[in-house]
Image (cartoon, rainbow, N blue to C red):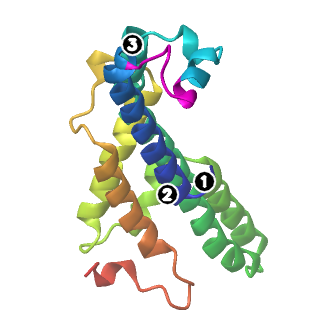
Amino acid sequence: MTTFDDAWAWYQATSSGAQVVARLAKYWDLMPWEGGEEWIRALARDNLFRHLEAGQLAKDAEQIENGLEDLAILMLFSVFEANVRDLVESDVRPEIEALKHPALRKAGEDVLQAVTEGSFYRVLEPFKSAATNDLIEQVNQVRRYRNWVAHGCRADKKPDALVKPREAYKRLKTFLDLLQPAPSQRRDLSEGMD
């Protein structure tokens, strides 16, 4: 998954699939497996379906749903982070390549390395302004939640703000939309977000 919208589509499809399995589990034992219509008899002959039980289907759906939101935050933020790093690098690289002095070129290379490999918190910091401070904090809440999930959801390290996938998507998408226009069309982030 390389685009943010692909990651969101994955979450929606997986969530929908888990809901379908949960709903199917409710009706599984009511299916007329023998003597029913041809399509039901075909399901009964299928090696996967004929060994399924309603209780196991329900447990599987619950298991998927229990971890899905956290996994979605992990996936959404990971793709978001990669997209932001790529966008910032593509904006900064031409400026660094234009530098002439060796000391400035070395400093520029260090900046590129920080953008591509360094702390993501530090990649976001330059975008803070009076107009974007709240949005950057909302993005950082998602980042902290993602870090908590990535490090095992330890109870003693639980973040202050729990973030649901839909809210994370909105926050991250808003920030990406500020970065994605062509540099010549990109408005200054300090101008506000109306």
Would residue 35 be seen by someone viewing this image from the given angle?
yes
Is 184 drawn above or below residue 77 in the view shown? below
Amino acid bearing label 3: Ala
- Residue corresponding to mark 2: 123
Task: Residue at 52% x, 57% y: name it.
Answer: 4
Labels 3, 2: front one: 3
Q: Quadrant of the C terminus?
A: bottom left
Which is nearer the N-term, disc 3 or disc 1?
Answer: 3
Residue 173, picture quadrant: bottom left
The correct choice, above or below, for 45 with respect to 88 in the image is above
> 65 or 109, which is in the foreground?
65
Q: Nearer the viewer, mark 3 or mark 1?
A: 3
Q: Which mark is residue 73?
A: none
Residue assigned mark 3: 54
Tell me if residue 60 comes above or below residue 175 in the rendering: above
Q: Point out the residue furthest to the bottom here.
A: 184
Name the kind of residue labelled 2 in the image.
Val
Q: Is most of the magenta stretch helix, strand or loop?
A: loop
Type of the residue with mark 1: Ala
45 or 47, nearer to the observer: 45
At x 61% / y 24%, what residue is drawn?
42
Tell me the number on the disc at residue 114: 1
What residue range appears in magenta?
31-40
Q: Residue 172: where, in percent of width, then height?
A: 39, 58
Q: Secondary structure at mark 3?
A: helix
On whether residue 34 falls in the magenta region, the answer is yes
Proximity of marks 3 and 1: CB atoms separated by less than 8 Å: no
Among the 4 quarters of the image, the one containing residue 131: bottom left
Pointer 2 with pointer 1, Cβ within 8 A = yes
As measured in the structure, the alpha-carbon distance from the residue carrying label 3 to the one carrying label 2 is 49 Å
Residue 23 image position (x, y, % from top left): 33, 29
